[in-house]
Amino acid sequence: MSTDKYDRTAASWTARQYADSATYLRRRADLIAPGLASGDLVLDLACGDGGLGAALEARGLRYRGVDANAAMVAEARSHGVEAALGDLNDFVPDEPVAATTLFRALYYARDRAAFFAHVAAYTEHKLVFDVNPRQYALADVVHDLRSAGFAHVEARPFFVPQRVSLGPLAPVAAAAERLEPLARAILRFRFTYVVSAFS
């Protein structure tokens, strides 16, 4: 897969992608950390500049990133992130990981079911990723996960905008995530699910 389009944007990627990167990445980490123990290793596929690392390390987790773009890997390393160059479809870590994450990059999986099976082979506890339900039918994604050996799947609405800071309205958005009929209606037009799949 070609990632050349990111060469010129790797520097300060996280700061430029998110209106409130601290809140956005903290909320991601809140959904990744449950069930993991201090010292567990999280592998972040398509990690970009490794911006998620600090939020996970603050929870006592170890973080390792992988990205297919050399400029992104160099940027991550410049921030002290342990990052490797690799294609998420083929990369295999040198040791099993407690959790694998993938955000804003599911479309890079050449064959979604095969990708899930590949990740399951080296992930001991769970896979966490986001899904745009207007792009992928959640039921199809769940089917592929279960076929890959992930027996338990949870999908939670994630109402944190990327380009706009909610400020004092953030608790309102968080509350809306838990109101199932309202959340389903909102997801028809905007936002994503964060899916946690357990073996």
Image (tube, helix red, strand yellow):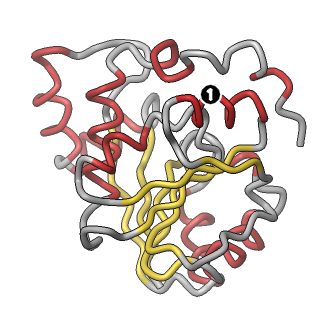
Say left or right for 143 vs 124.
Answer: right
Image location (x, y in percent) of residue 60: 25, 58
- Name the residue located 68 percent from the left edge and 32 percent from the top edge: 74
- Name the residue located 59 percent from the left edge and 36 percent from the top edge: 77
Q: Quadrant of the N terminus?
A: top right
Instruction: Tell me where residue 48 sits by quadrant.
Output: top right
Residue 22 position (above or below residue 11): below
| Amino acid on which disc 1 is placed | Glu
Instruction: Tell me where residue 33 sits by quadrant.
Output: bottom left
- Name the residue located 17 percent from the left edge and 25 percent from the top edge: 170
Say left or right for 53 vs 4.
Answer: left
Question: Counting other residues with Cα less than 10 Å from the Cα at mark 1, is it few (<14), some (14-19), or many (20 or more)?
Answer: many
- Name the residue located 56 percent from the left edge and 20 percent from the top edge: 13
Q: Residue furthest right?
A: 2
Image location (x, y in percent) of residue 195: 44, 59
Q: Pointer 1: what residue?
A: 75
Check disc 1 and report its element: helix, strand or loop.
helix
Residue 142 position (above or below residue 156): below
Say left or right for 110 vs 159.
Answer: right
Residue 72 position (above or below residue 105): above
Instruction: Tell me where residue 15 sits by quadrant.
Output: top left
